[in-house]
Amino acid sequence: MLAPREFKIVWADDDELFRTAVHAMLRQAGVEVYSCANGVEAVKLCETIKPDVALFDLDMPYLDGFEAARRLRSNPALLGMRLVAITGRASLDFRMRAVDSSFDQFLCKPVALRHLLRALHMTGPTAPARQVGGQNRVR
């Protein structure tokens, strides 16, 4: 497992309270994290920072997580970047759309910090959009 400081994360969620809480928890866990509020900002941040992992809410304004993922996957400079979906919508439709958008992991809100860190630390190609953890609370 990689040490948290060995990689950078872009974290995008339009829910300011949740975004701030997760950002603070990741920073406290030693993760280098950059946060934003929508998919447009997330794509720009990823293209600039070139993170190892992008953690996206799926239902965001201006550009949702699905389309943001498709745009990033088409950028050759970001081929090694892993994508993790996080959403409060755990429906089969959202899971299948995450698979179609090439997400590597799928997390359901609320998520326990240990499940979030496990998803961020998984290395190499992973099974498409598999769920890590369950309906656990952020701790």
Image (cartoon, grey):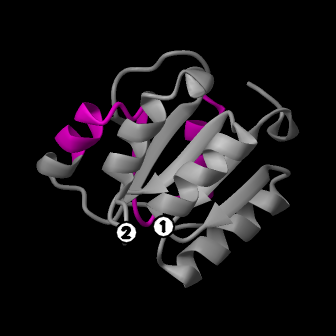
Instruction: Tell me the residue that label 1 is attached to.
Output: 38
Q: Is residue 114 above or below residue 125?
A: below
Residue at figure coordinates x 38%, y 53% from the top left: 65
Tell me if residue 6 comes above or below residue 19 in the rendering.
Answer: above
Q: Earlier in the sequence, mark 1 or mark 2?
A: 1
Amino acid type, residue under disc 1 in the picture? Asn
In the picture, measured across the screen, residue 40 lies left or right of residue 51, that is left
- Judging from the image, what secondary structure is the residue with disc 1 in? loop
Q: Which mark is residue 78?
A: none
**Which span is picked out in magenta?**
95-122
Q: Position of residue 3 (x, y in %)?
A: 83, 33
Measured as percent of width and height from the top left, residue 112 is found at 54, 58
Q: Seen in the image, is 37 located left or right of residue 67?
A: right
Q: Quadrant of residue 123?
A: top right
Q: Quadrant of residue 77?
A: top right
The answer to whether residue 131 of the structure is visible from this angle is: no
Asked whether the beta carbons under mark 1 and mark 2 sit within 8 Å of each other, the answer is yes
The circle on residue 62 is 2
Looking at the rendered image, the quarter that the C terminus falls into is bottom right
Residue at the farthest top position = 124
As displayed, is residue 90 above or below residue 79?
below
Q: Between marks 1 and 2, how big is the CA–CA gap?
A: 7 Å
Q: Amino acid at mark 2?
A: Tyr
| Residue 87, magenta (yes or no) | no
Residue 110 vs residue 114: left or right?
A: left
